[in-house]
Amino acid sequence: MSTRTPLIYTPKILDLFRNPKNLGKMEDATVSSQAGSPACGDVITIYLKIEDSRIIDASFESYGCAANIAAASIITEMVKGKTLKEAWDITWEDVTNELGGLPSIKYHCSILAVGGLKRAIRKYFQEIVKMHPDWLPKDLSKEERQALEEEELIERIYRKYGVVP
Ligand code: FES
């Protein structure tokens, strides 16, 4: 018998895990972005459809845990109808609150989801419209930075043990 203590998830997380909203690849997305490392299995892809600087649709794919799926799902709900600036202002703490809380060991799941969202918004400006709005910081947000650090850490571990991710 396992001696591990089960994590306590909120009813909202369990519901979104069982019935995720906006799950699946968006074929006509304006932009998409990934966060996480396929090597460890925690990967999220965010798809955004953008018109006139407003997100008119959003979807996601996730290869993470229940908390990651719930965080990604709720983000796609939170950003729909928002301007890019409003969506950019969403933090991992906002997502965690929307989920009714997360076990602290699972904070990284909502950080990864918000990191994916912010990367998508940054990519949209850098690669698609090729302009930099005043409100978009040049430096990475804390969620983008954390996602990057996790990806680099996993790569280092895999390199150290001779496994190619
Ligand atoms: Fe890594 Fe949830 S996404 S534990």
Image (cartoon, rainbow, N blue to C red):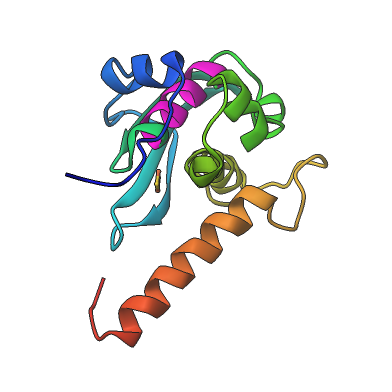
Say whether residue 21 is visible: no
Front-lying residue, 67 or 20: 67
Residue 124, x across and y down, in percent: 55, 42
Is 162 left or right of 100, judged from the image as shown? left
The secondary structure making up most of the magenta span is helix
Q: On the rendered image, what quadrant is the N terminus found in?
A: top left
108 up-or-down from 162: above or below:
above
Q: Report the side of 1 relative to 29 (left or right).
A: left
- Chain part drawn in magenta: 68-78
Q: Where is residue 53, by image quadrant?
A: top right
Residue 152 screen position, x and y as percent = 47, 71
* Magenta residue check for 49: no
Residue at position x 66%, y 33% in the image: 93
Question: Number of marks in the image?
Answer: 0
- Residue at image point 49% right, 62% down: 150
Residue drawn at point x = 28 percent, y = 63 percent:
39
Image quadrant holding the C terminus, namely bottom left
